[in-house]
Image (cartoon, helix red, strand yellow):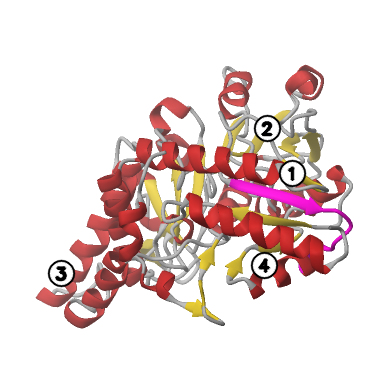
Amino acid sequence: MTDLSALRSDFPILKRTFDGRELVYLDSAATTQKPVQVIEAVDAYYREKNANVHRGTYRLSAEATDAFEQARAKVASFIGSPKSEQLVFTRGATTALNFVAYGWGLHRLREGDRILLTVMEHHSNIVPWQMVAKLTGAELVYLGLDDDYRVDLTELDRVFDERVKIVAVSGMSNVTGARGPVAELVAAADGTNAIVVVDGAQLVPHDRVDVASMGADFLAFSAHKMLGPTGIGALWGKEERLEEMEPTEGGGEMISDVGLTESRWAPVPHKFEAGTPPIAQAVGFGAAVDYLDKIGMDTVRDHERELTAYALERLAEIPDLRVYGPRDVEGRGGAVSFELGDIHAHDIATILDDHGIAVRAGHHCAKPLMRHLHVPATARASFYIYNTPAEVDRLAEALLDARRVFGLA
């Protein structure tokens, strides 16, 4: 197994204990822990360079602006963007998807147009499209899942026609870990008037992404799911799409001129970054991608794949436990959702917490998927670079204890 255990010393929070038990953090699909390198980068910015950006002529402001734009260049390079100007800083993937829905979709969708989604989408990649569909008269159509919890493409020919103007798909499910069929949907949209929007919140942190070869029109992702600070994410877009798109927020910084009755927008990406941006968070975002680049995303992917395979083997040993997700680790990520007998997911999470193990329980902001699976909630363990096989063993032991507590043993 790819051994990244030496990295654990970079994460101060992993030294915490609960009731004498070392923390086992298995909720990285919700948010990842932060290495000291990211924490120190944010701290150093506030200590040494804190000023507003793009505005002051004094040296401190110039240093802050350089740090902010260097972070943009790092994040853009991380996903293979040809130009850093194609990357817009946002408050997160949710904001980025809303930018596309309201900045592009609202101005181009008409009654009778279609927005194609999948039932495995996070609410962030459903709700904005529902809202825009109501405003424009567009229709929402969905692809379901096959028996292995992957998007079922057998219905694609039926739902994909000239009426489809937007295809929005998750690069990786935060519930099942299944990868979205991005390449297949990009191919289907090729030569049509449809654009492809990828929710990369779970994909970008876990595998190498190259937007040039991906072929999608937009990619949204968040810093906090890839070792960076909360409150910042990014929207990448093809140049022509960003030029077509209207800003959804108005204010300072995003304009080139303002009159009493109308304004002219600043060039991309600044026309989408109204007001004072999250400068310190951007610096931390840059430090996070530096950290991941040093490890190598191929190594990140291999570690997670091997750890997920081991977890699926250990969970298969536990009676009454059902995993909701692909059985083959090829083409899936490290989010493992499960049920244990008739024990409610929240009760499972409570027992695991007594063992010092942090997992998520609930609908995971994916209620349509929960209904599709005919379950009210699941427990979810999700892995990242700092997790180890020993922690998987502790998870398995704690689940056996949950069976005993609830009389299943």
Q: Nearer the viewer, mark 1 or mark 4?
A: 4
**1 and 2 marks in contact (CB < 8 Å):** yes
Q: Secondary structure at mark 2?
A: loop
Query: Which mark identifies residue 327?
Result: 2
Callout 2 touching callout 3 (CB < 8 Å): no
Q: Amino acid at mark 2?
A: Arg
Quadrant (top left/top right/bottom left/bottom right) for the N terminus: top left
Estimate the x, y position of residue 50 in percent, counting from the top left.
23, 79
Neighbours of disc 2 within 10 Å: few (<14), some (14-19), many (20+): some
The picture quadrant where one finds residue 236 is: top left
First of labels 4, 2 by sequence position: 2
Q: Which residues are magenta?
A: 335-346
The verdict on residue 336 being magenta is yes
Look at discs 4 and 2 and give the one toward the viewer: 4
Question: Which badge, 1 or 3, is on the more N-terminal residue?
Answer: 3
**Quarter of image, res 89:** bottom left
Quarter assignment of residue 72: bottom left
Query: Alpha carbon of mark 2 to alpha carbon of mark 3: how far?
Result: 50 Å
Outermost residue on the front side: it is 409
Nearer to us of marks 4 and 3 is 4
Mark yes or no: residue 266 visible.
no
Q: Which residue is mark 3?
A: 63
Determine the CA span between mark 4 and mark 3.
46 Å
